[in-house]
Amino acid sequence: MDGLDELRKSWLDRIGGASEEGALEEFRVAALGKKGEISLKMRELGKMTPEERQVAGPALNALKDEVNAAIVAKKAGLADAALDERLKAEWLDVTLPSRPRRQGTIHPVSQVTEEVTAIFADMGFSVAEGPQIETDFYNFDALNIPGHHPARAEMDTFYTHRKDGDNRPPHVLRTHTSPVQIRHMEQHGAPCRIIAPGRVYRADYDQTHTPMFHQVEGLVLGEDISMANLKWVLEEFYSAFFGVQVKTRFRASHFPFVEPGAEVDIQCSFEGGTVKVGEGDDWLEILGSGMVHPKVLEAGKIDPTKYQGFAFGMGIDRIAMLKYGIPDLRDFFASDLRWLRHYGFASLEVPTVHAGV
Ligand code: PHE
């Protein structure tokens, strides 16, 4: 077939000289597309004698493959060249020091909650949770605080609003973590060994009270549990938490959901306006506790003739203030960055049972 060499040379030259991918695509269509120059040549094969065709057919096919391969190779070459260009133009000095960037801190309440959890976990306690918006059944009735009981009034409870004509008792923002006792008993029965940390709410505001604060509840039920176990657990906890041996003092007190009930003080000294835990002759009230009232066990569907146990509730923010020397509770929730940077913890300060020591 005449002219194949020129055809070959003209396409390979053009492909070789292409400077962008778009041009290559145009060449491909113009040479190999339906009406491309090489494709039209293919059609001429039909008019040839079989002998002529035997020579021209393979030659044309070879030309087609060659042009195709040239386009592919040139495309890859252009892409490489473009990448080289970019690598030359864009560069990064990886030895430059990074820009200073302030890291956020862990809030003391979160940190102390983790510390408390780690210490109790080491004593075999697991963590239970309950809702912050409670029914008055779980927050009061099931805990042996009936409607007329003065404890309801004393708690400064936040009630939710009901529409006019809706006579169901309103929900409450839980005033303590004790309702988690009932929920846990209902779901898991006895024996059990849990703590329940979380937010609680009371309408109160001064240096040591905020309308939202944090408590951790403890509940241990079994067939042979006594106040002695309670005292051991608390002394063990406070000693690990404050990192010094801490003595406790139990004072008889009344909570409707325990019998007997006790307020617990920890040994401390008040000198020069600062409180030091684990030394001195003074005592600091720190928590409420007692043996779970039989009526509370019954409300939790537990047989009080078979099981008994202890419960306690303490303020997480309180013990955070004591351990880290934070004077005013209201600052905890003011979201003042200076305060958060000062009292916050680095995210890598992961609490362990040994951390306080
Ligand atoms: N719920 C009590 C409070 O908020 C604390 C407490 C818990 C007392 C468990 C006894 C037993 O003050």
Image: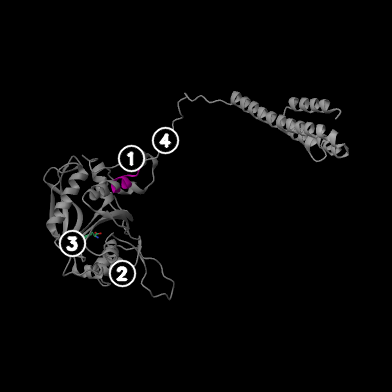
Work out whether mark 1 precedes mark 3 in sequence or the reverse, and give the earlier one.
3
Q: Which residue is mark 4?
A: 102
For residue 19, which numbered disc appears in the image? none
Q: Is residue 189 left or right of residue 252?
A: right
Residue contact between numbered discs 1 and 4, judged by CB atoms under 8 Å: no
Q: Nearer the viewer, residue 73 or 96?
A: 73
Q: Nearer the viewer, mark 3 or mark 2?
A: 3
Camera-side mark, 3 or 4: 3
Looking at the image, can residue 328 be seen? no
Is 303 placed above or below 339 here?
below
How would you rate the neighbour count of disc 4 (Cα within 10 Å): few for under 14, some for 14-19, many for 20 or more? Answer: few
For the C terminus, which image quadrant?
Answer: top left
Residue range (magenta): 106-113
- Tell me the distance, in whole angstroms, between the alpha carbons under discs 1 and 4: 13 Å
Badge 2 amino acid? Phe
**In the image, what residue occupies the spot 17% across and 48% down?**
236
Seen in the picture, residue 211 relative to 281 is either above or below; the reply is: below
How would you classify the magenta stretch by its main secondary structure? helix
Q: Earlier in the sequence, mark 1 or mark 4?
A: 4
Asked if the magenta segment contains residue 185, the reply would be no
Residue type at numbered disc 1: Phe
Residue at mark 3: 222
- Asked whether, in this view, residue 3 is left or right of residue 198, the answer is right
Q: Secondary structure at mark 3?
A: strand
Q: In what quadrant of the picture does the N terminus appear?
A: top right
Where residue 185 sits, quadrant-wise, is: bottom left
Query: Which label number is shown at residue 345?
Result: 1
